[in-house]
Image (cartoon, rainbow, N blue to C red):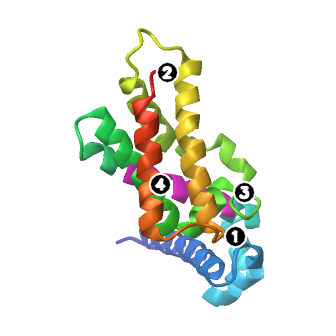
Amino acid sequence: MGSKERIARLKEETRLNILDAALEIVKEDGWNALSMRKIADKIEYTAPIIYEYFANKEGILLELTRKGYIILAGEIRTARNLHDKPEAQLEAMWVAYWNFAFKYKELYQLMYGVDMNCCELKKSMPEAELADDMLWDVIEKLITIDKPSEDFICRKYYTFWSIIHGLISINLVNKGRDDEMNQRILKDAIRGIIKYIND
């Protein structure tokens, strides 16, 4: 490996270490505790070195948000590909969304602003659309009316999202039920919306 490749690899490793350290700090102390100084201390670098990789904390938040959307899209894609029928695909995809929210709690909080201020720059992030587009496509397959309008499909997507995101948010702020009850509520909600999707 040449020196250019080695330098590039070391830079990428340092960048990833910064992101991993930021996430560790958040897991330990919450999003409000995150600072460039704490990240530098965690990886035993000086703060100016952190600024060589990210201009500010917002840059780190943006990159973590992007990472979250990429992981979410991958998990939703995997869930969709396990089934052939759109009804089963949609249920599996929303369950994968639910599971992502609790497996990657801190990223979900950042991505959707649960119990914190979310990163506003995500609106211009193409990765933010990956999971939404897959869910939208399967919802569209379930609609039996001829040539449904985009507004109609959009309403169905937001019906799903608002209920599932609401359930996740309730549980992330520790106001939910036990896991068995949550799974029953989640499945009831998904199946109920699927049943009435053409109304």
Q: CA distance from mark 3 to mark 4?
A: 27 Å
Q: Which mark is residue 199?
A: 2
| Residue occupying the point 41% across, 50% down | 187
| Residue occupying the point 55% across, 76% down | 20
Residue 162 image point, x, y percent: 60, 43
| Residue occupying the point 75% across, 79% down | 33
Horizontal side of residue 24 vs 190, given as left or right: right
Residue type at tag 2: Asp
Q: What are the residue bounds of the magenta stretch?
A: 61-76
Q: Of the residues under marks 1 and 2, which one precedes in the sequence?
A: 1
Q: Which mark is residue 95?
A: none
Callout 1: SS: helix
**Can you tell which of label 3 and label 2 is closer to the viewer?**
2
Q: Which mark is residue 118?
A: 3
**Rendering quarter of residue 3:** bottom left
Q: Main secondary structure of the magenta part?
A: helix
Residues at marks 1 and 2 touching, judged by CB atoms closer than 8 Å: no
Q: Which residue is mark 1?
A: 52
Q: Of the residues under marks 3 and 4, which one precedes in the sequence?
A: 3
Residues at marks 4 and 2 touching, judged by CB atoms closer than 8 Å: no
